[in-house]
Image (cartoon, rainbow, N blue to C red):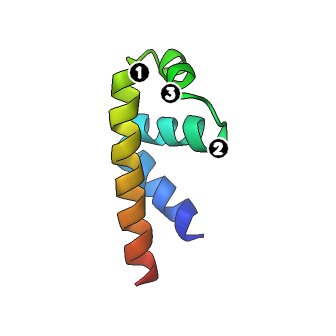
Amino acid sequence: MALDRALQRLAERDETLSHIVNLRYFAGLTVEKTAEALHLAPATVKRKWRLAQAWLYRELHEAIA
C-alpha cells in the first residue's frame, strides 16, 4: 500500500516521472522503448528514471520509518 500511495503522489507531482516508472518497472520496457513511447530522448528517460527511483526510495523509506 505504501508503494501505491507513493506512486499516486509521484503522479501528482510529475506525470512524466510516473509514466516512466510504469513503463520501465511495470511494463519492463527498455530506456529506448520508453523514450520512443513518450517521445523523449533516451538520455532524458535515463535522467528522469534515476530521479523517480530516488524520489520513490525516499518516500518509501519515510513511510516505513
Could you say whether the residue bearing mark 2 is in a helix, strand or loop?
A: helix
Q: Which residue is mark 3?
A: 31
Q: Which is more toward the observer, 38 or 11?
A: 38
Which x, y percent locates residue 23?
58, 35
Q: Are marks 1 and 2 in contact (CB under 8 Å)?
A: no
Amino acid of disc 1: Pro
| x and y, in percent, of residue 28 in the image | 65, 36
Q: CA distance from mark 1 to mark 3?
A: 6 Å
Q: Is residue 3 above or below residue 21?
A: below
Using a 10 Å C-alpha cutoff, classify the residue at mark 1 as few (fewer than 14 neighbours), some (14 to 19) or many (20 or more).
some
Query: Nearest the camera: 22 or 43?
Result: 43
- Determine which of the numbered discs, if any, sits on residue 26 in the image: 2
Q: Give the quadrant of residue 3.
A: bottom right
Q: Image height check: is 37 above or below 13?
A: above
The residue drawn where x is 43% and y is 76% is: 63
* Image height of 49 relative to 38, above or below: below
The residue mark sitting in front, 1 or 2, is 1
Q: Quadrant of the N terminus?
A: bottom right
- Name the quadrant containing residue 26: top right
Q: In the displayed structure, does residue 3 sit left or right of residue 53?
A: right
Q: Amino acid at mark 2?
A: Phe
Picture residue at 49% right of the left edge, 36% below the top: 20
Q: For the view shown, which residue lies furthest in the right direction? A: 27
